[in-house]
Image (cartoon, rainbow, N blue to C red):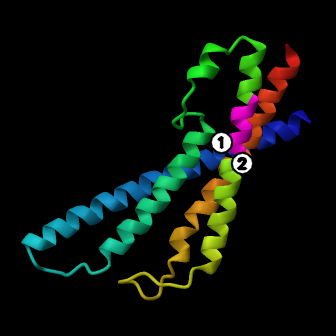
Amino acid sequence: MSSLLSLLRAGDRMLSRVVRTLCVVAMAAIFIMFILNVFVRFVPIYNFTQTDDWIQFALVWMIFLGAQELVRTRNHFVVDLFTARLRDRLSGRILRVVVCLIELATYAVICWYGWIWVMRSNATMQSIPWMEVRYMYAAIPVSAGFMTLYGIRDLLEALGRLRLR
């Protein structure tokens, strides 16, 4: 059991490095495309017709992968007014379980409907006719799927704290 947990932690760290690297690459690509697009408006040496779609593609993936990483590290935006005040009480631990259940349900619903959205999407990008929009939309179920796994992790930890005390 211990070796399985250490394997899962190693996989989690590796996934985190990959996701962070992809987010940095996407942000750098967005920055470079913006700068080049502005430059060519003043010095018309080349017409970048596809940059808007590529920027949109990189932005969507960066946002959803970044949100996934924030959920993994528990740094995503939360309202913890009640859970912070009731932290050491039984009611606070029960409230934490309820919050985890709500988060888990939200991530699972986003993942499910994101998958449906990807599968129903038949359109192509406006200036990149060979790229289907579903490749951009795929960021939703991919990141929400991992968020669901992290939600399960948080729920199991909250349930463990509930039983310990």
The circle drawn on residue 61 is none
Quadrant in the picture for residue 108:
bottom right
Q: Residue at x 48, y 82 (%)?
A: 131
* Vertical comparison of 84 with 122: above or below: above
Q: Residue at x 36, y 66 (%)?
A: 55
User: In the visual, does 15 lie left or right of 134?
Assistant: right
Magenta stretch: dominant secondary structure: helix
Magenta residues?
97-104
Q: How many marks?
A: 2
Q: Which residue is mark 1?
A: 13
Q: Nearer the viewer, residue 41 or 102?
A: 102
User: Which amino acid, mark 1?
Assistant: Arg
As for residue 116 lying within the magenta part, the answer is no
| Marks 1 and 2, the one that precedes in the sequence | 1
* Vertical comparison of 38 with 70: above or below: below
Q: Which residue is mark 2?
A: 105
Crowd around label 1: few <14 · some 14–19 · many ≥20 (10 Å)? few
